Structure formats: structure tokens, C-alpha cells
Image (cartoon, rainbow, N blue to C red):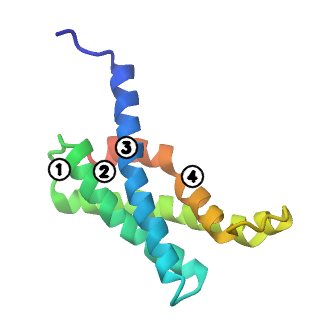
């Protein structure tokens, strides 16, 4: 059977990354919603992101980037580094959207949920590249 062109494999892998990441993001969103019952929005976003990170690490390591020869501790450290960057970006985008942009636009329909979803989606492409070529390389 002929080998698929590299570009096609990369697109399929990125789509699978988005699907798995979507599940981790759903975990993140649900956790943030539940955490908001006991704490303010900003710390809830941070704790929810950590919950999503744990799910994502398990899914990516088992189902997507299965060829890694590096030690588990190295992958965990690198995963945390990439996600600290992504988490910071998600937190900034979520907070700016919820506290500044959506109110300025007159947005009233679930502004914190919409802001958080946009924030969580923002680092998807850079996270894929960094996980593929750094975390699980």
C-alpha cells in the first residue's frame, strides 16, 4: 500500500489532536463552570486549565504521539512548559474578553462562558506544534 503524503498525515494528526483537545477543553469548561460556584472566575480558569491539561496529557501520550522514546518525567515537564504558555494565553484572552471586550461590545449572553471558550481555543495550533516537535518528540 502506498504511503500517504506527509501533508495528509499531518492534517489527519492535527484533526485528531483537535478532537482529543476538544475533549480536554470540554473537561476544562465544565470544571470552570463548577469551580465558579466556590471561587471567582479568574482562579477558576486556572484550576480548570490544569484539569484539562491532565486529561490532554493522558490522551495525547496514549493515542496521538505514541512514538516518544523520552522519559515520562521529561515529557511531563515539557508538557507543563507548553501548557503554561498556552494556559497563560488562554487566561489572558478569557479575562480580556470577559472583562473588557464583550462588555464593551454590549455582549450579554453568557459572557464568561463565551470568553472562556474563546480563550481555551486560542492556543490550539501552537500547542499542537510544540507538543509534536518538543513534548513528545
Sort mark 4 into few (<14), some (14-19) or many (20+) by Cα contacts within 10 Å.
some
Residue annotated with mark 2: 135
Outermost residue toward the bottom?
38
Q: Nearer the viewer, residue 92 or 20?
A: 20
Residue annotated with mark 1: 70
Q: Secondary structure at mark 4?
A: loop
- Distance (Cα) linking label 4 and label 2: 19 Å
CB under 8 Å between discs 2 and 3 = no
| Nearest to N terminus: mark 1 or mark 2 | 1
Task: Point out the image quarter for the C terminus.
Answer: top left
Please state the horizontal and vertical placement of residue 112, each as a whole percent of the image. 65, 70
Please state the horizontal and vertical placement of residue 44, each as a whole percent of the image. 51, 79
Can you say whether 23 is above or below 19 in the image? below
Can you say whether 114 is above or below 7 in the image? below
- Front of the two marks 3 and 1: 3
Task: Point out the image quarter for the N terminus.
Answer: top left
| Nearest to N terminus: mark 3 or mark 1 | 3
In the picture, measured across the screen, residue 17 lies left or right of residue 106, that is left
Residue at x 44%, y 49% (from the top left corner)? 127
Amino acid at each position: 500500500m502506498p504511503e500517504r503524503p506527509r501533508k495528509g498525515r499531518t492534517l489527519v494528526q492535527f484533526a485528531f489532536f483537535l478532537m482529543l483537545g476538544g475533549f480536554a477543553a470540554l473537561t476544562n469548561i465544565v470544571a470552570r463552570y463548577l469551580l465558579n460556584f466556590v471561587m471567582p472566575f479568574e482562579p477558576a480558569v486556572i484550576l480548570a486549565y490544569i484539569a484539562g491539561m491532565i486529561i490532554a496529557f493522558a490522551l495525547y501520550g496514549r493515542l496521538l504521539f505514541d512514538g516518544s522514546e523520552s522519559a515520562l518525567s521529561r515529557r511531563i515537564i515539557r508538557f507543563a512548559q507548553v501548557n503554561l504558555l498556552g494556559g497563560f494565553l488562554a487566561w489572558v484572552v478569557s479575562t480580556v474578553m470577559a472583562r473588557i471586550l464583550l462588555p464593551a461590545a454590549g455582549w450579554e449572553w453568557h459572557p464568561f462562558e463565551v470568553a472562556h471558550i474563546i480563550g481555551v481555543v486560542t492556543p490550539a495550533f501552537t500547542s499542537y506544534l510544540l507538543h509534536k516537535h518538543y513534548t513528545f518528540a
